[in-house]
Amino acid sequence: MYIDVIHKNLSSYNPKDLYPYAPPAGKQELREVWRKKLLKDNPSLEGKGFGTPIVTNGLTHGLSIVSDLFVEKGDSIILPDKY
């Protein structure tokens, strides 16, 4: 799904190349490049076990992933009330 005016102005491109959704953990190529950069910038990490970074699609997605680390189905959580 895309907005017609955007597609008309970018008609020379394949919609699959312009409007793809990234996998939930982020594009694997980006994650691997980021991990290599972490190792290059922090040589003390070499040989230590750590996974490939996760690239989120936005703040809400990132918060959702973090909450999944700490909250199980059926757990009670406390949320602030805006009003």
Image (cartoon, rainbow, N blue to C red):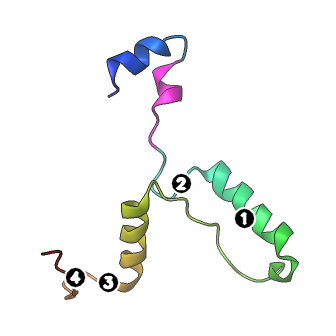
Answer with the quarter of the image where residue 76 lies.
bottom left
- Location of mark 4 (residue): 79
Answer with the quarter of the image where residue 13 lies.
top right
Q: Nearer the viewer, mark 4 or mark 2?
A: 4
Measured in 3D between alpha carbons, the distance from the residue under mark 4 to the one under mark 3, in whole angstroms, is 13 Å
Of pointers 3 and 1, the one earlier in the residue sequence = 1
Please name the residue shown 71% across and 81% down the image: 49
Please name the residue shown 73% across and 55% down the image: 33
Amino acid type shown at disc 4: Leu
Camera-side residue of 16 and 8: 8
On screen, residue 83 versus residue 59, left or right, reads: left
Residue 42, position as x, y percentages in the image: 82, 76
Measured in 3D between alpha carbons, the distance from the residue under mark 2 to the one under mark 1, in whole angstroms, is 13 Å
Callout 1: 10 Å neighbours few (<14), some, many (20+)? some
Q: Nearer the viewer, mark 4 or mark 3?
A: 4
- Location of mark 1 (residue): 35
Measured in 3D between alpha carbons, the distance from the residue under mark 4 to the one under mark 2, in whole angstroms, is 27 Å
